[in-house]
Amino acid sequence: MNILVLGSTGFIGKNLIKRLEPEGHRISTCSRSAGVDIRNYQQIRNRISETDPDIIFNLASHGGSMRYVREFGADVVSDNLQMSLNIYRAVKELNAKIKIIQPFSNCSYPGDSSVQYEENWLSGDVHKSVFSFGNSKRGIYYISKCYKDQYDINTVNLLFPNTYGPGDSIDPNHTHALNGMIIRMLQAKKKGDKKFVVWGTGSPVREWAYIDDFVEALVMAINLDNIIYPLNIGQERGYSIAESAIMIKEEMGYDGEIVFDTNYQDGDPVKIMSRQKFEESIQGFQWFDHRKGIANTIKYYEEKL
């Protein structure tokens, strides 16, 4: 099978390629660092044409921390929608039988959600802390639906919780949330800091997907078709930010005190994803243990920092 991975040098892209390589697929890559800017229609059209994929994993995304997506919201929305429009236009013109598989963040759920059920995904506004990023993902859904309705383009849209694990950026400002906390605590430990500051109250509850689980769900999605209205990839199990911080402290052996800076705005109070439809669609999925995932991630960053 010919597979094109967009965003191939990112955290998820690198891990997906590593997972796919032993299966004998012909894997092609695409990233801005390799000279293809998906915001440029001709560049992405040329890349799709020359690789002739059966499946495109669209992992290209403009995002960042809550502070970043607030400050640069217009850029986030513009880039994410422009990339999506260019991808679908190119697929329509070159080969409308290409399947597009793409993950969305569960921050695109309404901000007042507790357990996130797919049928409620568009029932309210996303949380103001991620207004630009969350709404850009909803916009990509609308693009995929319109191209399905008019051109019968096969898309599998998947909603994921926060991801973490080895292989992400070592910059705490440009990594995923839990990885960023691990990096900052490692730095505090190395400096001998007696206090570690967690931004916000620590009370928001988040569901976490270890990177191997995230990637395995993407691979399993190869066997799905026409999931336009997105499917949760969730286990319906969450941990508060404070609980995860304590796990990190314990696994790392950091002996400082964890304190909470309430001057920072909390995001959604609870983000836990219903697992019912996921278990009906993908049976027998085994989730990685959260504490073990944290331990693996700490080990990775200890070697990198």
Image (tube, grey):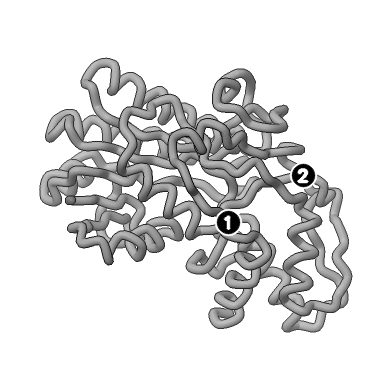
Q: Is residue 94 left or right of residue 249?
A: left
- Res. 71 in view: no
Seen at 14% across and 30% down, the residue is: 93
From this view, report whether residue 296 is shown above or below residue 267. Answer: below
- Badge 1 amino acid: His
Residue position for label 2 = 204
Seen at 49% across and 49% down, the residue is: 285
From this view, report whether residue 209 is shown above or below residue 281. Answer: below
Q: Is residue 252 left or right of residue 192?
A: left
Residue 303: percent from left, percent from top: 56, 82
Asked where in the image residue 48 lies, by quadrant, the reply is top left
From this view, report whether residue 26 is shown above or below residue 93. Answer: below
Can you say which quadrant of the picture contains the C terminus?
A: bottom right
Residue position for label 1 = 176
Residue 257: percent from left, percent from top: 88, 70
- Badge 2 amino acid: Pro
Asked where in the image residue 301 lies, by quadrant, the reply is bottom right
Q: Is residue 170 left or right of residue 24?
A: right
Q: Indicate the secondary structure of the residue bearing disc 1.
A: loop
**How many angstroms separate mark 2 from mark 1 (CA)?**
16 Å
Asked where in the image residue 132 lies, by quadrant, the reply is top right
**Earlier-in-chain disc, 2 versus 1:** 1
Q: Residues within 10 Å of mark 1 (few under 14, many from 20)?
A: many
Out of 187 and 284, give the one closest to the viewer: 284
Seen at 51% across and 38% down, the residue is: 279
Q: Which mark is residue 269?
A: none
Q: Indicate the secondary structure of the residue bearing disc 2.
A: loop
